[in-house]
Amino acid sequence: MKVLVTGASGLLGGEVARLLVRQGHDVTTFQRRPSGVDGATDFRGSITDEKALAEAVDGVEGIIHLAAKVSFTGRAAEFEQVNVEGTRNLLRCARAAGVRDVVFVSSPSVANSGAAISGLGAEPADPERAHGDYSRTKGDAELLALAADAPEFRVAAVRPHVVWGPGDTQLVERVLDRASRGRLPLLDAGAALIDTTYVDNAAAAIVAALHRMDHIHGRALVVTNGEPRPVGELLAGICAAGGVAAPSWSVPGPVARAAGAVVEKLWTLAGREEEPPMTRFLAEQLSTAHWFDQRETRQLLDWTPAVSLDEGLARLAEHYRLG
């Protein structure tokens, strides 16, 4: 199959593209900087550029769409332009080019209003109740993508949850940086039970979705390792792998959520580009349970995670040991 992967310069997008290459597909990647994926053909551009997209999708049979603006803060208009309008552009170009299948890579946060999640599946996206511009616009984009599903243009959404692994700058590097400076608290003693997804497993599930469109088009599926752990235990494991001391001080969850909301607003008003030390969404993620029932996902995708959390942490430790 000739497959286009958008956002392949990121951790997950790059692993998806490499897996497709290993499987023997003809892979094209589309992003603003080189993907670094051996065996793939790079197209450089933004998903906000419809002309560039039209060139990238020419002759493509399947698309895996990961390109997005991912951040805790930033201008709302930028999230809207990239995440919603960029997805709209991609769908329009894909239909015009005769693409058969599109896998939209989403996030469980599109259906999370901040309450604890314990054993649910993929609830409908609810942008109006989602917290933060990233979650809201990804929710809008997911609804837009699934609404385009048709027998001749099949669309599915896959929501990998908290993806991490060697080379991860979104979670792992931030945890290690803040822990090394003593600026990473545990919220409510790190007791909240959460699911995460090792990057190889997330990539394998996304590629499986492309192969299982007969079974899943028109639907959203949450993907995780299916191994809920207390968040404090997970953070300690990441810190041990990176050779820094684990966080040992605790802050009440409600205090962190209130402080995060204030910090987030001040950061945005000041126009600061770097990520703030705390946001409301981050505080919610660290202080509330969020784990998911994976039985339906595994059945529909005919997939199970190949890398356990403990094996993933061992691989992370080896990554830092080798430098």
Image (cartoon, rainbow, N blue to C red):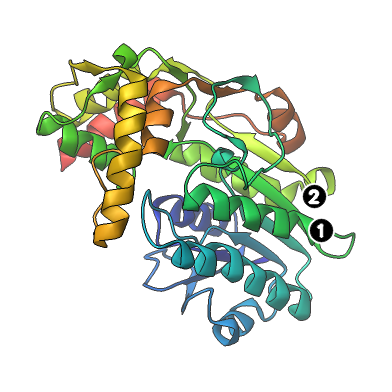
x, y percentage for residue 59? Answer: 70, 79
Q: Quadrant of residue 176?
A: top left
Element carrying mark 2: loop
Q: Which mark is residue 173?
A: none
Q: Is residue 171 visible?
A: no
Answer whether labels 2 and 1 touch (C-beta < 8 Å): yes
Q: Is residue 3 above or below residue 311?
A: below
Please name which of the two marks, 2 or 1, marks the residue nearer to the observer.
1
Name the residue type under label 2.
His
Is disc 1 placed on a helix, strand or loop? loop
Look at the image and tell me in which quarter the C terminus lies.
top left
- Crowding at dot 1, Cα within 10 Å, few <14 / some 14-19 / many 20+, comes out as some
Marks 2 and 1, Cα distance to the nearest angstrom? 7 Å
Does residue 311 appear to the left or right of 295 in the view shown? Answer: left
Left-right relation of 121 to 266: right
Instruction: Residue under label 2, please give it.
Output: 217
Residue 97 rendering spot, x and y as whole percentages? 74, 79
Q: Measuring 58% from the left and 35% from the top, which residue is drawn there?
A: 112
Please say if 315 is above or below 211. Answer: above
Query: Residue at the right extreme?
Result: 151
For mark 1, what is the residue?
149
**Front residue of this view, candidates 6 and 46:** 46
Residue 96 sits in which quadrant? bottom right
Amino acid type of the residue that numbered disc 1 sits on in the rendered structure: Asp
